[in-house]
Image (cartoon, rainbow, N blue to C red):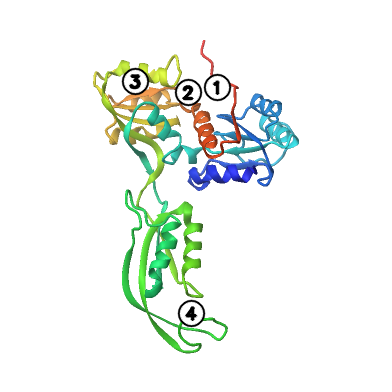
Amino acid sequence: MKIKEIVSYLESIAPSSLQESYDNAGLIIGDPQKTIHSALITLELTPEVLDEAIARNTHLIISHHPLIFKGIKKLTGATQVENMIIKAIKNEIAIFATHTNFDSVVGGLNSYLSEKIGLHNVRVLKPKENHLLKLVTFVPEDHVEGVKAAIFDAGAGTIGNYDHCSFNNQGMGSFRAGEKSKPYTGKKGEIHIENELRLETIFPRHIKPQVVQALLKSHPYEEVAYDLYPLENKYPLAGMGMIGELNENWGEKAFLDRLKKVFDIHTLRHTQWLGKPIRKVAICGGAGSFLLSDAIRAGADIFISSDFTYHKFFEAEDKILIADIGHYESEHLVKEILGDLIKKKFPTFAAQISEVNTNPINYY
């Protein structure tokens, strides 16, 4: 199997365009055309994980956290990251990361964590903004259904639980074909009037190439008139954090005991007990303290995440219980998730889970 096949599949689930601006998800090192027989999956790429890949004769490492976050101007081996880059290249090991894009997409890390703790009616806590586009195009009446089918098949026209959504308005289009043109209808040099439908629909920004290509391929005109408008509407299928409900009320201590069991942790930090039942739960793997106000506004009884600073705990203001379970602890299950996805899609491909504990934090 070629690396690009694995990359294409994982990016169909969590497109790199959904990553945050500071992130560096995608194929970071390696030739996408290279044929491989196995991959090593890890939360963090460390020297020990790289040595593990070499020992296993694996030529692709799939990591949640990118090896390279910032630009590198020199490769002299002066830093640990530079040394790993050099060593990976020497051993022909490709490196791929799926990070905040996999965090944010429905069906990704936070969806999985929600399922693990027993949430239902799960939705994105903070939906992505400025990610929707409106397509407006003009189609001769006898080709409308064909164009619609093409752009809908490409992913356009979905609003919540509804698909094939569009608005259509009849009108008259006019044009004059030039001498070098090949008009679908009308004559060169003459103004032509055509009965057309104004077709409007929406789609998420990350599928723009597919939608535009489908439009151009299905439209009968030599030159297709279309407009793309950015929308401020929120995109409910991607964003940061998740929120959902438990099937029944839980006591605070009992639910924290459940978290310790699910995430395999021995200790966690939390705000003072509020003496209230827990039913509505917000969660964000990794450093999610920036979502605290969103969790409060959404009416969550508890917010589960990590990397809360001392002063951030005060912002709970007795409105919500904060459970800081640790960064590594909240994300290490990503190895299991990615492994299951790859094994299901490619049953004969060896998707190996790293045995290295990459948590840099120790407790004494």
Q: Which residue position holds label 4?
A: 184
Q: Is residue 57 above or below residue 171?
A: above
Pick whichever of labels 4 and 3 is earlier in the sequence. Answer: 4
Q: Amino acid at mark 1?
A: Asn
Label 1 residue SS: loop
Viewer-nearest residue: 234 or 209: 209
* Residue 53 seen in this snapshot: yes
Q: CA distance from mark 2 to mark 3?
A: 18 Å
Q: CA distance from mark 4 to mark 2?
A: 61 Å
Label 3 residue SS: loop
Which mark, by number, is residue 271? 3
Q: Quadrant of residue 9?
A: top right
Whether label 1 touches label 2, CB < 8 Å = yes
Q: Amino acid at mark 4?
A: Tyr
Pick whichever of labels 4 and 2 is earlier in the sequence. Answer: 4
Q: Position of residue 225 (x, y in %)?
A: 45, 72
Viewer-nearest residue: 326 or 350: 350
Label 4 residue SS: loop
